[in-house]
Image (cartoon, rainbow, N blue to C red):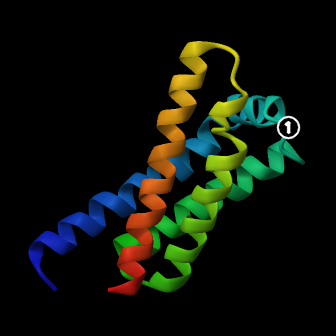
């Protein structure tokens, strides 16, 4: 395994693991946002997504259960793109732009994970 790949897996896995931790540390605000977006069981949704992000990120970082990690993260990213970052529903121009960027980022990360899975 090349040094560049190891650096990439630590950075990518760390990105998701930190995002998962933020779901737990910022649960109150994220739960309110999830409720505003109409997610079912917002508090449980935030906790479950935090766990998925944390475990998926750690799986990538330590190259453990990578197929499971990639699959969980891809599912999370696609679901979040279409439910949380639904820019087409936003009325405010800034909110529309922010959600559009996050939507595209989620789909690009999901595509990158698909490529890693295929490698």
Q: Position of residue 27 (x, y in %)?
A: 69, 38
Q: Position of residue 62 (x, y in %)?
A: 36, 77
The correct choice, above or below, for 119 with respect to 15 in the image is below
Figure label count: 1
Is 2 left, or right, of 43 in this rendering?
A: left
Q: Which residue is mark 1?
A: 38
Q: Position of residue 30 (x, y in %)?
A: 69, 34
Determine the residue positioned at 67% across, 32% down: 88
Is 53 left, or right, of 60 in this rendering?
A: right
Density class for disc 1 (Cα within 10 Å; few <14, some 14-19, many ≥20) is few
Image quadrant containing the N terminus:
bottom left
The correct choice, above or below, for 108 with respect to 92 in the image is below
Q: Quadrant of residue 74?
A: bottom right
In the image, farthest residue toward the right: 41
Q: Quadrant of residue 72?
A: bottom right
Determine the residue positioned at 63% across, 54% down: 50
The correct choice, above or below, for 16 with respect to 30 in the image is below
Is 76 left, or right, of 111 in this rendering?
A: right
Image quadrant containing the C terminus:
bottom left
């Amino acid at each position: 395994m090349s040094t560049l790949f190891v650096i990439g897996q630590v950075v990518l896995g760390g990105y998701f693991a930190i995002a998962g931790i933020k779901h737990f540390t910022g649960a109150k605000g994220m739960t309110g946002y999830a409720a505003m977006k109409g997610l079912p069981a917002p508090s449980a949704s935030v906790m479950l997504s935090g766990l998925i992000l944390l475990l998926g990120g750690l799986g990538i970082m330590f190259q453990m259960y990578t197929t499971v990690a990639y699959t969980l993260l891809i599912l999370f990213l696609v679901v979040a793109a279409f439910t949380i970052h639904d820019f087409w529903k936003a009325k405010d121009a800034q909110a529309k732009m922010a959600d559009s960027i996050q939507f595209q980022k989620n789909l690009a990360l999901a595509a990158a994970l698909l490529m890693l899975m295929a490698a």
